[in-house]
Amino acid sequence: MTITPEREAELLASVPTGLLINGAWRDASDGGTFDVHDPATGQVLATLASATSEDALAALDAADAAQAGWARTAPRERAEILRRAFDLVTERAEDFALLMTLEMGKPLAESRGEVTYGAEFLRWFSEEAVRDYGRYLTTPEGKNKILVHRKPLGPCLLITPWNFPLAMATRKVAPAVAAGCTMVLKPAKLTPLTSQLFAATMMEAGLPAGVLNVVSSQSASGISGPLMKDSRLRKVSFTGSTPVGRRLLADASHNVLRTSMELGGNAPFIVFEDADLDKAVEGAMAAKMRNMGEACTAANRFLVQASVAEEFTRKFADAMSALTLGRGTEASSKVGPLIDGGARDDVHALVSEAVAAGATVATGGAPQQGAGYFYQPTVLSNVPNDAAILGSEIFGPVAPVTTFETEEQAIALANASEYGLASYLFTRDHNRMFRVAEQIEFGMVGFNAGVISNAAAPFGGVKQSGLGREGGAEGIAEYTTTQYIGIADP
Ligand code: NAD
């Protein structure tokens, strides 16, 4: 389907531009606004109300007032709201996909993939809402009883990044709804439109006023600061960079808030000589190029056994150089723009530094000329192990390749990072898979798989990649607190 300017304008006009507080859309208390841009053209897409600290506190007032009643609703009722929301998001998949492409830049096919992935959290947690089990047991002494059950935590602050505008919101909102928590959601200022439309969809699905409040704003700390000082807030769930996560953890210590921190990553992609190399290249393309490399799970360091490094690098570079760059709305586009000029400059600085340190450009290596923040799909070989590009999140379509000789070396190189989110392992040897998985310090391992995110799996990291898990059976526990009742010998 061709995307006409009229179709874009009609969709943009359907997105609420206000703050969602206590079930009503309203202007910011000081009348402030901010613009949202299309990274492929630099054009303004929409102007939204920019929440102030006062608005953030009004959102918490609403969440706090709704909390007790919401916690008492039947789990089945919460489940059915989530299931209706899943159906509505699925029905409107094309609208959500186009909106993400417009504000974030990824090609439409990828945005459609994100709608499927993001909506799945609504369905998964609609099923989890009614399966929140406790336990009842006799004490070891044999007389008294122990009753353990879980309760909703209370009002939560949810802060999301710009790179997956729908999935990062549903991954937090769905388990919070399932658990019976109320929320204040603050989307990233670069891509808030999807959250605005998603919140409108949640209201249409029957979510009561005050349960989900949305305060898009150009001042992130102006929202989180006052909320995290307020004793009515019980939790902050953050997805974003490690430096901001660290700051929020410090702020959370003030009221000893529960925290979930989904932070940065620096995923190793390990290819052993016994791997199916074509499958490894296919996996590498998915793990590197999904979201133009702007993903916390993006393969960042390609560690390839020396005997197959040349062949792997050649095949990988051929596949990367065949990709077409363009605005995500064009059917031919396989690679969209990076989110802004700063992001593109950062990527190029890492590439330039690696090349100056001795890396070889197998393909790409430069920004694309013209409008939009495009960067050429790039493969670098012979990257020195101390190059900055191997130590930092690249967040762009650049793949540095380095080599190892033995399994022990591969493990040591993989673990030489302060991050521990996703990792990828390509080998035909299942014993090796278990051996390596046990020794690498990562929350997630893709075994012969380049994409591992799934609503039914616990997503999260170790080390400076964060705390807590989203999705799976673990996801709902992040929004509950455990209470134990000791019962005297009945
Ligand atoms: P970011 O840390 O700059 O921003 C994330 C969110 O925090 C945004 O909503 C932003 O407005 C807000 N924020 C920024 N400064 C803040 C402050 N001082 N106080 C309160 N809130 C603040 O990250 P980003 O650039 O939006 O996203 C990219 C980062 O997110 C990467 O590091 C990536 O790895 C990470 N990420 C992690 C996961 C995961 O699940 N682990 C998923 C996606 C992205």
Image (tube, rainbow, N blue to C red):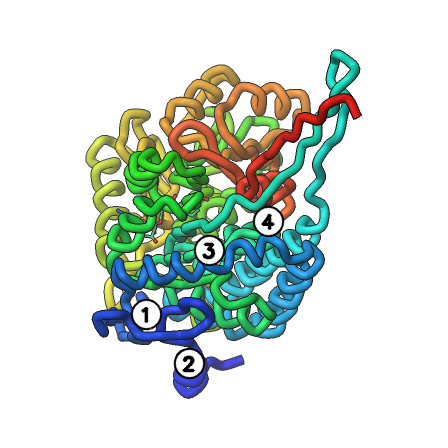
78, 186: nearer the viewer: 78
- Residue 342, x across and y down, in percent: 22, 54
Q: Amino acid at mark 4?
A: Ala
- The label nearer to you, 4 versus 1, is 4
Q: Residue at x 27, y 48 (%)?
A: 225
Q: Residue at x 21, y 44 (%)?
A: 349
User: Whole-Å distance between the Cαs marked 1 and 3?
Assistant: 28 Å
Residue carrying label 4: 179
Q: Residues within 10 Å of mark 4 (few under 14, many from 20)?
A: many
Q: Secondary structure at mark 3?
A: strand
Residue carrying label 2: 8
- The label nearer to you, 2 versus 3, is 3
Residue 19: quarter of image: bottom left
Rendered view: 433 above or below 189? above
Q: Earlier in the sequence, mark 2 or mark 3?
A: 2
Rendered view: 301 above or below 216? above
- Residue 250, x across and y down, in percent: 30, 34
Rendered view: 196 above or below 374? below
Residue carrying label 1: 38
User: Whole-Å distance between the Cαs marked 4 and 2?
Assistant: 36 Å
Residue carrying label 3: 183
Q: Earlier in the sequence, mark 2 or mark 1?
A: 2
Asked if residue 155 lies left or right of residue 480, the reply is left
Q: Earlier in the sequence, mark 4 or mark 1?
A: 1
